[in-house]
Amino acid sequence: MLGALRLTLCAGLLALACGAAFWISLRSQQAPGSNVCSAEVKPISVVFLVRHAEKDDECLSTAGKERARRLAEVFRRTKVHHLVASKLCRTRETLEPLAALQRIDAKQIAEVGDLSLESAGAVAKLVRSFEAGQVTVVAHHSTTLQEIAVELGVSRRDAASIDTAGNDSLALLLLPPGGEAQLVQLSYK
């Protein structure tokens, strides 16, 4: 029961965060002192960074596969447009239940990078190539998550707050066009 409550709460927070991104997008397009939105609204891209679930060796353990299913449940009521993993099977396996739930062909999970910090730039470049206003979930590694956030525009100080030790950390990045990236820390159990 408590697990279901946590998933419901996390899903609710997720919906709230996506809604907030929409309204921030609208407010950022207003002229100073104006209560009317301009005709052109530039949508905010939403990126979730998650560390891969628990692993045995290279691939997920039984506990990791269960956590991957719980991650998919968090996004049950949210449209996800893109899934990005590293080339290691544990990140792909973390996203596969989410891909199935979202009806995204698992072959369309983009595989970018590995455990190296150099991977962060490639992940960020791919994410920035997606159409503005879309939702992307990136599953990567404790060694790369903070650097990916920095490459996407989060300050190094804020990115350092991303929990890379736990497998239940979920970092929400709001990427307004031409604006400063915002970071919200979440978790799922």
Image: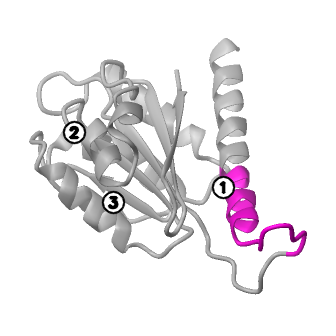
Of labels 2 and 3, the one closer to you: 2
Q: Residue at label 3?
A: 106
Q: Estimate the spatial distance between the alpha carbons at disc 1 and disc 2, rounded to whole Å.
A: 25 Å
Of labels 1 and 3, the one closer to you: 1
- Residue flagged by tag 1: what amino acid is it? Ala
Q: Residue at label 1?
A: 21
- Residue flagged by tag 2: what amino acid is it? Thr
Q: Who's the residue at 72% across and 37% down the image? A: 12
Most extreme residue toward the top is: 2
- Residue flagged by tag 3: what amino acid is it? Ala
Q: Estimate the spatial distance between the alpha carbons at disc 1 and disc 3, rounded to whole Å.
A: 27 Å
Residue 45 is situated, as x and y percent measured from the top left of the image, at: 52, 62
* Label 2, residues with CA under 10 Å away: few <14, some 14-19, many ≥20: many
Q: Who's the residue at 29% across and 66% down the image? A: 126
Query: Is there a contact, CB below 8 Å, between mark 2 and mark 3?
Result: no
Q: Secondary structure at mark 1?
A: helix
Residue 16 is situated, as x and y percent measured from the top left of the image, at: 73, 44
- Is any part of residue 108 visible from this angle? no
